[in-house]
Amino acid sequence: MHESIRRTLRLASLGACFCFGLASCGGGGANSAAPARLPGASGGGSSASSSSITFPLSPAGTTQKLPAAGGIGGAVTFPKADVPSGATMTVSSSTTASASGFSEKSLHRLATGSLSVLYYLVFTPSVTVQFPTVPGFSIALPSGVSTAGRQFYYAISDPTVTDVALQFRTEGPASVSGQTVTFDASAKPLTLQAGRSYVFAFYATTTGATLQSRINHVIVVYQENWSFDGLYGKFPGANGIANAGSVQQVDKAGAPLASAPQPLNANNNPDPRFPSSTPVTPYNLLDYIGTADATTGDIIHRYYHEQLQIDAGKMDKFVTWSDNGGLVMSYIDATALPEGQLAAQYTLADNFFHSAFGGSFLNHFWLVCACTPTWPNAPAAYVSNPDPTALKDAQVTPDGFAINTAFTVNSPHPATITDSTGLVPEQTQAHIGDRLDAANISWAWYSGGWNDAIAGHAAPLFQFHHQPFAYFENLRDGTPARAAHLKDEQDFFGALQTGTLPSVSFVKPLGPDNEHPGYAALERGQQHVADIVNAVKNSPFWNDTAIIVTYDENGGRWDHVAPPAGDRWGPGSRVPALVISPYAKRHYVDHTQYETVSVLKLIETRWKLAPLGTRDAKANDLVNAFDFTQTPN
């Protein structure tokens, strides 16, 4: 454990009151009788629906029994402040906490930098209870505990999970009003089994200041169309295919499928490299195509299709609602590929979801504005019918939002489209560039093939709908802002060499280098990412840079992890994300929940920018992937 963290474990000097329920809570010292409330039992003459068993907080290192009323008993232990270096965060081998599996890794993965464990207790319920049993709970802090510049979290262990790295239910950051910290408890309640020991930790971070002192450049590399299991389902330590359990795909009526059809090639013909049917369980694509530098057919990845494939979290209709069902269960183990080697060296996030259902078009918007573009008067032929019995997954929702591939009325767009009514009108929503401009923070979008595209001779694999900033009114053709911010990928490499790299860079590789199945080879795209990383490492910017490599969406491929609850737009399926930096944790798999707009949240946190919407405001900001105490190398 880092000495800076160990120094913060001053539990005896911090007093507070835990309120696991609806009742209000007052302040108090560590030895006061201010109650902590364990969920799920009644006591003190009140009904079970409105109160819980209470017990007084104890000094650090002491143990006391819970009251017998209500049938709950067990030990409550506050850990000693002196945690041995390199030991688990289970206080010491002399306490019952050592059986909890509450490791340094498990807590430190939640938040890094300046971290304070404010309260930390071990308890063993004698009856099975739910935590929490109410919509939320509050913790009232005494006046001596500062809330300024801090984010508050809690974690509770789940010993029923065998993987230590996945044993902890976490919530936060909490909302803060005065000295009251309130958690909304939006996650599914955790069942606490009778007779088992659990650890509850309440802690605070001041990651913003640390992030601001270490990172001056953020580079986002946005690749294409792979699910997490599709590339890293075999990655050591990740939540991969081995954790999927019994994998089943069903037809539209819910009946199990025995097999999937023969995959189609890029010309939509049966691919002769494959047999006439393929498994409906995960299978290694290289067994058929031989090398990661070969191409395959594409797979449908549209807004309504993905929601039907996810099937309310059952993840069992990917084959049925695909136009290339024989490919959706395939994977390539990318562990030994160029990006996989980077993931092994730095941090791989295995709980990162693309923010919007469907394809590249919409997810590129969510990357830059956490928003869905509007198209109120789209041609009737472009309007979707979301009814599964007559599904038409077209460019626009019935209420006028653009969701699937469509092109901007600005340049560049395909020369074949000459009727402007078939082009998306200029957008006026706020985007991250606006926030950065207002704060005088430099930024640019670097796109492979951009200069040729705006000159009217786009490369064959230039993707017009992968250029989200081009859709906005304040970045329209001919504006100084467009010239200042929308650039060619070669300008990125030039900026590294000339020392003119902006604070925030988005890098969008040209089609052959973006890993998109159907027209690009995986290994070539991965090597391109490695070349970008090496160029940054060999530049004067490396020592204060964070590189985020992620994918716009899953490309129609299956993943075994259901997306978290969100809104009508997403999140969609899980995708890979890598954090590469001299301050990225080494050899680390980050299980924190993230989504595409977590990239925005990181930028907003670093430069103290206002959020663009509710989703990025609530998203985790990727700081758990960093250890700012590391020395750059």
Image: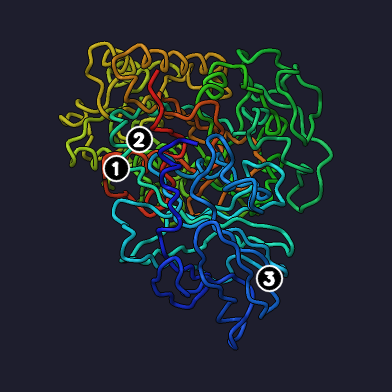
Expressed as whole percent of the image width and height from the top left, the position of residue 146 reads: 31, 57
Q: Which residue is mark 1?
A: 431
Measuring 36% from the left and 49% from the top, which residue is drawn there?
A: 374
Is residue 424 left or right of 495 when viewed as pictured? right
Q: Is there CB contact under 8 Å for labels 1 and 2?
A: yes
Q: Residues within 10 Å of mark 3 (few under 14, many from 20)?
A: some
Q: Total of numbered circles in the picture?
A: 3
Mark 2 or 3, nearer chain start: 3
The CA span between labels 2 and 3 is 57 Å
The CA span between labels 1 and 3 is 53 Å
Expressed as whole percent of the image width and height from the top left, the position of residue 183 reads: 46, 63
Q: Which residue is mark 3?
A: 73
Measuring 59% from the left and 70% from the top, which residue is drawn there?
A: 38
Would residue 597 be visible to someone looking at this image? no
Q: Residues within 10 Å of mark 2 (few under 14, many from 20)?
A: many
Expressed as whole percent of the image width and height from the top left, the position of residue 500 reads: 22, 18
Q: Find numbered disc 2 in the image and state the secondary structure of the residue it sits on.
A: helix
Query: Which is more foreground, mark 1 or mark 2?
Result: 1
Q: Residues within 10 Å of mark 1 (few under 14, many from 20)?
A: many
Question: In the displayed structure, would residue 611 be above or below residue 473?
Answer: below
The CA span between labels 1 and 2 is 10 Å
Q: Which mark is residue 262?
A: none
Q: Nearer the viewer, residue 624 or 120?
A: 120
Question: In the displayed structure, would residue 332 be above or below residue 597?
Answer: above
Mark 1 or 2, nearer chain start: 1
Type of amino acid under label 1: His
Question: In the displayed structure, would residue 149 be above or below residue 184?
Answer: above
Q: Which residue is mark 2?
A: 468
